[in-house]
Image (cartoon, grey):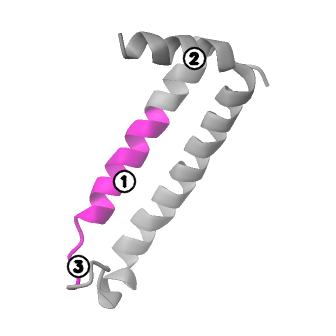
Amino acid sequence: MFLKFEKFLELKKEADQKVDDLSKKLQSFSREANGMVKQEIRNSREFKIIKSDFDFHFKRLRQINEYGNQFFKKELRIERGNRFK
């Protein structure tokens, strides 16, 4: 399957947003003094669902980035250069 660069950027943006949203939800759970989420919360259904969704979308984002690095090196380099100008 080959994507056009614009479609790749669209998929990447959507995946980035989804990962960011799920990360914020995971960070919103209360934590112990050492920074870890409490075990009771980690065992809850809500946490497990959000964590599972996060893992899925994070893996998908990694695959999208891997695809982009393989097929759009030149375009990505140009875009990154333009972003910092």
Residue 38 position (above or below residue 18):
below
Residue 25 in picture, x, y percent from top left: 29, 59
> Where does label 1 land, which residue?
22
What range of the chain is rendered magenta? 14-32
Q: Is residue 26 visible?
A: yes
Q: Looking at the image, is mark 1 or mark 3 earlier in the sequence? A: 1
At label 1, the amino acid type is Leu
Residue at the (56%, 55%) spot, across then down: 56
Foreground residue among 50 and 85:
85
| Screen quadrant of the N terminus | top right
> Where does label 3 land, which residue?
31
Label 2 crowding class (10 Å Cα cut-off): few <14, some 14-19, many 20+? few
Residue 36 in picture, x, y percent from top left: 32, 80
In this rendering, the label closer to the viewer, 1 or 3: 3
How much space separates mark 1 and mark 3, taking CA atoms? 17 Å
**Mark 2 and mark 3 residues within 8 Å of each other at the beta carbon:** no
Disc 2 secondary structure class:
helix
Q: Is 20 placed left or right of 72 in the picture?
A: left
Q: Is residue 55 magenta?
A: no
Magenta stretch mostly in which secondary structure?
helix
Residue 11 position (above or below residue 41):
above
